[in-house]
Amino acid sequence: MPSRSPKFRPEAWLASVALIAICVISLGNVIVRYTTDASFAFTEEFSVFLLVILTFAGAAVAARNNQHIRIELVEHYLPPPALKGLFVLQWLIGVAVMGVTAWYGVTFAMQEYEWESLSPGLGLPNWIYVVWLPLMAVAIIFRMTQNLVDRLRGKKDPEVIHES
């Protein structure tokens, strides 16, 4: 089996840290709830925030590694010139969706900051949670662009075996 060189992906680390934090927070809350009949107030708020981070960070990793859901049948039967056009079309659609997400994420974060909205559970400024949405959307756009460049240069990804 050929070995691949390790890759440093900040999004992969961020997703891993978010998943570990969700597990630790949830486990701690369960233990405290069953031993004291009380629960931590912050667990749901932080868990939801970390789940959003985990989702977007994982999407950035998937975008870089060409692992997003798509219809590969069309890609397998197109001639190379048309295939490159399909790659660009896929990229344009992805950038449009993530661009809209980033735009509205920035607008939402700015509104939360200006209105000084506080989170319902802990009373923290809401913009702290919301600002991650446009940042992660931009990270996904960056990774999609890297993937497009690799695909246009003809770099082949290792065949992915889907276990279903």
Image: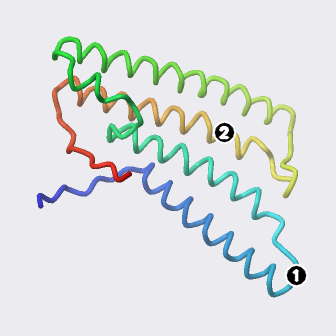
**Res 144 → quadrant:** top left
Residues tagged 1 and 2 counted as in contact (Cβ below 8 A): no
Q: Residues within 10 Å of mark 2 (few under 14, many from 20)?
A: some
Residue depicted at x 17% and y 33%: 155
Residue extending farthest bottom: 35
Q: Which residue is mark 1?
A: 37
User: What percent of the width, then of the height, locates residue 160?
Assistant: 27, 46
User: What percent of the width, then of the height, locates residue 11?
Assistant: 45, 49
Residue depicted at x 41% and y 32%: 142
* Disc 1 versus disc 2: nearer the observer: 1
User: What percent of the width, then of the height, locates residue 34?
Assistant: 80, 83
Q: Which residue is mark 2?
A: 131
Q: Quadrant of the N terminus?
A: bottom left
Is 101 positioned to the left or the right of 10 in the image?
right
Q: Is residue 127 above or below residue 44?
A: above
Residue depicted at x 66% and y 30%: 105
| Numbered disc 1: secondary structure | loop
User: What percent of the width, then of the height, locates residue 90?
Assistant: 38, 21
Numbered badge on residue 163: none
* Residue type (three-letter) at the residue carrying disc 2: Val
Q: Residues within 10 Å of mark 1 (few under 14, many from 20)?
A: few
Query: Alpha-carbon distance for marks 1 and 2?
Result: 35 Å
Q: Nearer the viewer, residue 126 or 16?
A: 16
Q: Is residue 4 above or below residue 75?
A: below
Q: Is residue 157 above or below residue 119?
A: above
Residue depicted at x 39% and y 35%: 143
Residue extending farthest left: 2
Is 53 positioned to the left or the right of 142 in the image?
right
